[in-house]
Amino acid sequence: MSQVAGLDPQSLPILVVDDEADNLDAFRFNFKKSFRILTAQSGTEGLAILQKERVAVLVTDQRMPRMTGLEFLGRARAISPDAVPIILTAYTDVDVLIEAINLGHVYRYITKPWDAKEMRGVLLQALERYHLRAENARLGDQLREYAGYLNQEWHGAFNFGQLVGNSQVLKTALSRAEQVSRTHATVLLRGESGTGKELVAHAIHINSLREGKPFVRVNCAALASGVLESELFGHERGAFTGAVARKPGRFELADGGTLFLDEIGDLPMEVQVKLLRVLQERTFERVGGTETLRVDVRIISATHRNLEALVAEGKFREDLYYRLNVFPIVLPPLRERLGDVPLLCQHFLHKWRHHSSGRVTGIEPAALEMLTQYSFPGNVRELENLIERALILASNPEIRVADLEFSRPQGRKAAPAIAAPSPSPPIFKAAEPGPGTSPNPNPVPGTFPIAAAGAMSAPPTNAQVTPASGMPSPVISDAPAVAPSPSAQVAAPASGGGRSLADRLHDQERTEILAAIEQSEGNIAAAARQLGINRSTLYYRLRKHDLLHLLPSRPESET
C-alpha cells in the first residue's frame, strides 16, 4: 500500500462514473477492500454526489450519453477543484485526451479494458497526489499564519530580539538604535565582546524600511585578506586558482538591504581602500572583473577595538573611520548594568532548560548574590555560558553556589563590581578580629574577610560569614558543619584586596572538598552526599583541584 506517511487510502473517497453497471460492479469487486469506492451511472448523478462528499479521485468513462467524461470533469472541477481526475477511454479518443492532459484537465488516462493491477497502482498514486497537495496547502497556511504572528511580534514595538535588561545605560543605547533605524544612515556599534552588537544590528535592520531585504553578515576578523576581498566584492571566473565560476560578493547579496561588518577594526588595509570607495560612490568591481556594479546597501559595522588609537598608529584609515562613524552607538558592558543580571539569568534558564530536562527552575539567593557581584569580563556571553554550564552540573531544583564555575582567566584583574540596585545592597560583614590582629577598617564589599595567615583556619562548611542583608552566604552544600583538619587548613593574606573573588571561592571549595573526603575516609559516595552534589560532579571537581590522589587506590564499596 501507500508509502506516504499519514495517508489512509480508505479515508479518501474515489468516485467512479460510468453508464454501464457492469463496469461499476468490476470496480467494487476489485477494489472495495483497498479503497472507499463511490459509484454513479451518469455525469448528473456524479455531480450530485460531489455536492455532498469530499472526493479525492474522480474516475470517469469518456463515452457516456448526454455528458462526456471531459464535460463531466469540467463541471466537477468547479465543485471539487482539488480532486484528481482520471479518465477511461478507447484508443480512438487518445488525441483528444492528450490535449486535455496537456491543458492540466486530466491527471491520467487508462485505456479499456483496464488491468486490475495497473488500475490499483494508478488509484494509489492519485490518492498520494491528493494527500500531498492537501498537506502542502495546510503547511502553507500554517506557515503564513506563523509568519504573520512573527511579523506582528517584530513590529508591534521596536524589538531587540534577545537583548534583555532594564538598566538606564542599556535603554540609552537602544533608544539611539531606535532613532537611527528609521533612516538609511551608516551606524558604528562599539562595545566589548559579548555585549550584543549583532543583536542590535539585526534589530536596526528589521525595524527599518529595508526589513524586507537581506541582512548579510561578514566577520572581518575571520578571513584572510585575499579571501575577505572575494567574499565582500565577489570574483569572476578565473580570477585566481580555484575560481571556477563567477561568485557574487556580500555587497551584491545585500543589495537593497543591510550589510553588517563585524570586527571592522581588524579589516586589512588593502581592503579598507576598496571599502572606502563603496561607501563614497556605492560602486565596485568584482575581483578579476572590469564591470562596475552599483549597489544600494546600508552599512552597519561593529568593533570592540579602539579605532581612534588604530588611526593614530596608522593601522586604520582616517577617512574610512569618519565614513563609518556617522552614527555611533556604544553598548555598555555587563559590569555597568549588573542590575540586569537577574533578568538575564531567568532568560538563559528558560533558553537552556533542556540541559536539565526542566528540572532546574531557579537560582538560589546566594548564587544570584554572587553573580551580581562578579565583573563579567566576557559580558553577557560569559553569563550565558555560566548558566548553561550550571544547568548541566546542577543536581537540585535551584542552581547553587557550588554549580557556578567562573571561567575568567586567572591573573586578570576583575573590574570593580557595581552593585545591583536593590532596597538593601548586599554587603558582607567584616570578620571579628582575633587575638593579636587589628580590625580591618575598610572591608571590601562582596568579599569574604580572611584573618591573618595562621590566625584562622579555612572557612567552615556551613559558611559562618553572613551578608548584612540577611541572605545566606555561599556554601557548597547543605551538609552539617565539618571542622576541617589541619591538613585542610589554608593560609591566606590578611585582607582579600590582593585576590579576586574567583580565587577565594576556588580555595574555599577546595577546602570543603578536602574536609569531606577526610571525614568520609575516602568514600566518594559519602563525601558527595555530605557536599550535596552527585558523584560525577565530585569526581569532576577532584580533577579540577588535582585531588584524585587522595582517594584510595581500591575504594571501598560506595553505598
Image (tube, rainbow, N blue to C red):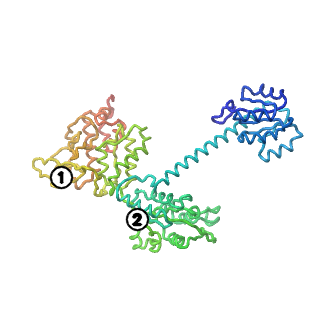
Label 1 Cα crowd, 10 Å radius (few <14 / some 14-19 / many 20+): some
Q: Which residue is painted at 52% across and 50% down in the image? A: 150
Q: Which residue is painted at 34% across and 41% down in the image? A: 399
Which residue is farthest right? 92
Question: Going by the image, does 522 lie left or right of 45?
Answer: left
Q: Which element is circle 1 on?
A: loop
- Front residue of this view, candidates 416 and 103: 103
User: Where residue 198 sits in the image (x, y, percent)?
Assistant: 46, 58
User: Where residue 473 sits in the image (x, y, percent)?
Assistant: 25, 44
Q: Which residue is mark 2?
A: 305
Amino acid type assigned to the residue bearing label 1 in the image: Ala
- Front residue of this view, candidates 181 and 273: 181
Q: Earlier in the sequence, mark 2 or mark 1?
A: 2
Q: Which residue is mark 1?
A: 494
Which quarter of the image is occupied by the N terminus?
A: top right
Amino acid type assigned to the residue bearing label 2 in the image: Arg
